Image (cartoon, rainbow, N blue to C red):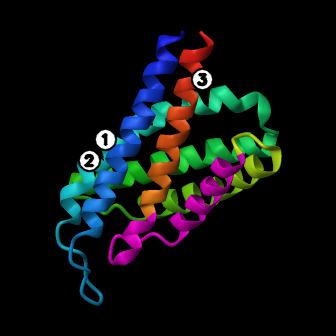
């Protein structure tokens, strides 16, 4: 058993569960007034950053586990999605220090969502995960394109957390069972 891989897969699972908790708490807030912001969303940014940090460690392990199964386009899409995810996190970190998170967070989110959709399509075509996992991953990636923290669309972040928690559990099971 490779302990770094096991620990990073645990971090993916934990980060995904925190991601789900954060977005669920945002979704339960009152919607934003027209042209305004939702009250209480700023209180969740540190938890969101923590979940992004944990998930990133696990996502790198998932990538290393499947890199041999992916063509160049899939590898590039995954790495660009991961870069977008980190850019989005960096924008939110700036916001925590009182700076404008845009355009860093916005560009990061767009990169993340678009390249995650491309990566999901490659996984679907190449059969990288189980058929159900591939389909849910693609649907979760598409739902991120519509995500907003202003209204009901914040619920669209939950499938993303669920599928990556599932992938982390699946990879962790294989990591422990094979060693």
Circle 2 Cα neighbour tier, 10 Å, few/some/many (<14 / 14–19 / ≥20): some
Q: Horizontal and vertical percent for residue 133?
A: 63, 48
Which residues are drawn in magenta?
131-156
Name the element at disc 3: helix
Q: Is residue 171 magenta?
A: no
Residue at image point 21% right, 71% down: 29
Name the element at disc 2: helix
- Seen from this angle, which residue lies furthest bottom? 34
Name the element at disc 1: helix
Q: How many marks?
A: 3
**112 is higher (above) or lower (below) than 67:** below
**134 is higher (above) or lower (below) than 41:** above
Image quadrant of residue 78? Answer: top right
Q: Do the residues labelled 1 and 2 touch (CB within 8 Å)?
A: yes
Q: Camera-side residue: 69 or 50?
A: 69
Q: Camera-side residue: 90 or 62?
A: 62
Query: Quarter holding the C terminus?
Result: top right
Going by the image, does 113 lie left or right of 118? left
Residue occupied by mark 2: 47
Q: Horizontal and vertical percent for residue 84?
A: 53, 51
Q: Distance between the residues labelled 1 and 2?
A: 5 Å
Residue occupied by mark 1: 50
Of pointers 3 and 1, the one earlier in the residue sequence: 1
């Amino acid at each position: 058993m490779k302990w770094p891989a096991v620990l990073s897969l645990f971090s993916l699972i934990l980060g995904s569960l925190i991601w789900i908790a954060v977005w669920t708490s945002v979704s339960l807030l009152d919607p934003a007034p027209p042209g305004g912001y939702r009250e209480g969303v700023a209180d969740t940014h540190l938890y969101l950053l923590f979940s992004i940090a944990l998930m990133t460690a696990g996502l790198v392990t998932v990538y290393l586990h499947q890199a041999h199964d992916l063509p160049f386009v899939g590898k590039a899409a995954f790495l660009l999605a991961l870069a977008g995810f980190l850019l989005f996190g960096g924008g939110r970190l700036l916001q925590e220090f009182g700076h404008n998170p845009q355009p860093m967070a916005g560009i990061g989110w767009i990169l993340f969502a678009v390249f995650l959709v491309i990566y999901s399509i490659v996984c679907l075509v190449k059969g990288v995960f189980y058929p159900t996992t591939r389909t849910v991953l693609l649907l979760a990636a598409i739902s991120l394109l519509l995500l907003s923290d202003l209204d009901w669309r914040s619920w669209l972040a939950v499938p993303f957390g669920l599928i990556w928690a599932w992938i982390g559990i699946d990879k962790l099971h294989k990591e422990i069972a094979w060693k």
